[in-house]
Image: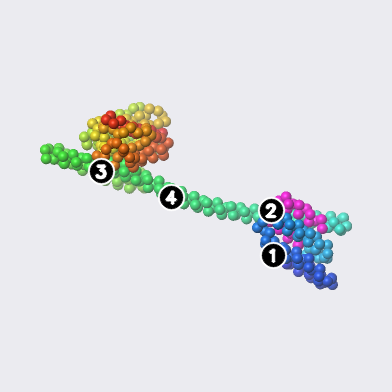
Amino acid sequence: MAVVSIVSFVTIAVDLVGSGRSAVTLVLPALFVLLATVGFARVWPQRGRWPAYVYVAGQLALGYLVFVLHSSVVGATLLLIVLVIQSALVLPAAAMVVVVALVPLVHLGMAWRDGLREGLGLLAASATAAAITTLLLREQRARGELAEAHARLREYAVQAETLATAQERNRIARDIHDGLGHSLTVIQMQVKAARAILPADRTRANAMLDKAQAQAERALHDVRQSVAALRDAPAAAPLPEALCALADETTATGVPTVVEVVGAARELPAAVREALYRAAQEGLTNVRKHAKASRVDLRLEYSTEQTVRLEVRDDGRGTIPVPPTTLLDTTGEDAPPAGAARGFGLIGIEERAASLGGWAAFASVPGRGSRLNVEVPG
């Protein structure tokens, strides 16, 4: 626009020299060009504010005077077109339309036929310039909004990646705790039992050590499976069979465990099977470590088509009563039942159940045992 304004001024100056008129008449075109370049730079950021209206009104008046006082119709018309473009940049659409409608009125002093012809031509040129400017503005805004959207999308992608990484770390931590931690607890108790009876019954002690060795081998196998699962998940046994295997392990440590399946067993999604299996595993681990129980019951209920429920119940020493939605655990093998704190294992059960849209609850009565319930859609 600055270049067009300067070219328009040069055109007016050339016509003025050719006509032999005084150079003083160039003051108005020079003022118009000065305002259109230097003055507009101050108005442009203030779109739709009163300085923009004052600027456009003043320039429109100057444009009329330049058009009337100078014979250079082309130069004066170009100045008015520049004003129309600038009004599209700094005024609302309604005010811009008013400017476009007012610009052709500079031809009112002409004969009506010539004035109508020239006025319609200037109106068409002004409307075209305003429309093109408006479209360019919209495109510029759209590009800016698109750039902002891309920046936000990149931020969201980074946040999603961070969240996915944290979730995967938690999942791996739960798997290590529930799988390897369970196996190591079984091995520890078998070794302790073998050491306790070793002086009196070497044959039975050797049998327990053989079981501990077998459990260690299974734990190593599970670790290898977990590593392989990061690339390809291995086929899993049906949940009732897997629970029976857990029960056999607990029974082998001296705590008889019975599995009861209620309802017709059905195929479960991998995430549901994993959550229930890990819940049973953690529940039995806590029983062996803390409950001092003489019996454990594992109950798997396919009571409805929408949900599956698991219950781990023991007849051990129990803990202080807690709200049914609170999960408790202890960290030391011989830790006292009173005032037990939430542990990672049972927190993991709660997280797994919640992620599937289910729930987990722990209830206990001192001297009468504890009960862990987990229900998930399946």
Secondary structure of the residue carrying tag 1 is helix
User: Start and end of the magenta stretch?
Assistant: 77-106
- The secondary structure that dominates the magenta segment is helix
Residue count near mark 2 (Cα–Cα under 10 Å), binned few <14, some 14–19, many ≥20 = some
| Disc number lying in front (4 or 1) | 1
Quarter of the image where the N terminus is located: bottom right
Q: Quadrant of residue 201?
A: top left
| Residue 38: mark in rendering | 1
Secondary structure of the residue carrying tag 2 is loop
| Disc number lying in front (4 or 2) | 2
Q: Position of residue 109 (x, y in %)?
A: 86, 58
Mark 4–mark 2 contact, CB under 8 Å?
no
- Number of numbered markers: 4
Q: Residue at x 26, y 35 (%)?
A: 291
Q: Residue at x 65, y 58 (%)?
A: 45
Distance from disc 3 to disc 2, alpha carbons, whole Å, reads 74 Å
Mark with earlier residue (3, 4): 4
Residue count near mark 3 (Cα–Cα under 10 Å), binned few <14, some 14–19, many ≥20 = some
Whether residue 224 is visible to the viewer of this picture, yes or no, is: yes
Secondary structure of the residue carrying tag 3 is helix
Mark 4 sits on what residue? 162
Coloring scheme used? rainbow
The answer to whether residue 362 is left or right of residue 188 is right
The answer to whether residue 34 is left or right of residue 296 is right
Q: Nearer the viewer, residue 25 or 88?
A: 25
**Kind of residue at disc 2:** Gly
Mark 2 sits on what residue? 48
| Residue 184: mark in rendering | 3
Q: Position of residue 208 (x, y in %)?
A: 18, 39
Distance from disc 2 to disc 1, alpha carbons, whole Å, reads 19 Å
